[in-house]
Amino acid sequence: MSKWFVNCVTDLLIAFILATLLLFYTAVTHPEFFPQRFFHYWAVAKPESVSTVPAQISVVTQVQP
């Protein structure tokens, strides 16, 4: 029973690692498949097609009489 459980957990870990590597490889080689926020959040790659957009900060000023 424990051998079966260890085999299942090992298979799940291997599948997760392979999926992660495939995601990383695809993000680096084909950045057009991913939204721009993916690269800003994970910082996986800095493709030239993804330009950095400066964040707009709105400042509300209050005028006191």
Image (cartoon, rainbow, N blue to C red):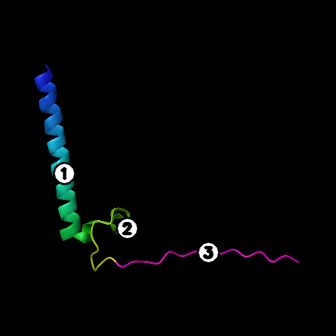
Looking at marks 2 and 1 on the same chain, the residue that comes earlier in the sequence is marked by: 1
Quarter residue 56 falls in: bottom right
Residue for badge 2: 40
**Residue 55 is inside the magenta segment:** yes
Residue at image location 26% in from the left, 71% down from the top: 32
Residue at which label 3 appears = 58
Tell me if mark 1 has few (under 14), some (14-19) or many (20+) residues whose alpha carbon lies within 10 angstroms of its own. few
User: Could you say whether the residue bearing mark 1 is in a helix, strand or loop?
Assistant: helix
Q: Amino acid at mark 1?
A: Ala
**Rendered residue at 21%/58% (across/down):** 23
Q: Which residues are magenta?
A: 51-65
Q: Residue furthest right?
A: 65
Disc 2 from disc 3: Cα separation: 21 Å
Q: Is residue 62 left or right of residue 21?
A: right
Residue 10 x/y as whole percent:
14, 36
Do the numbered discs 2 and 3 sit on residues whose CB atoms are within 8 Å?
no
Q: Position of residue 59 (x, y in %)?
A: 65, 75
Q: Position of residue 43 (x, y in %)?
A: 32, 66
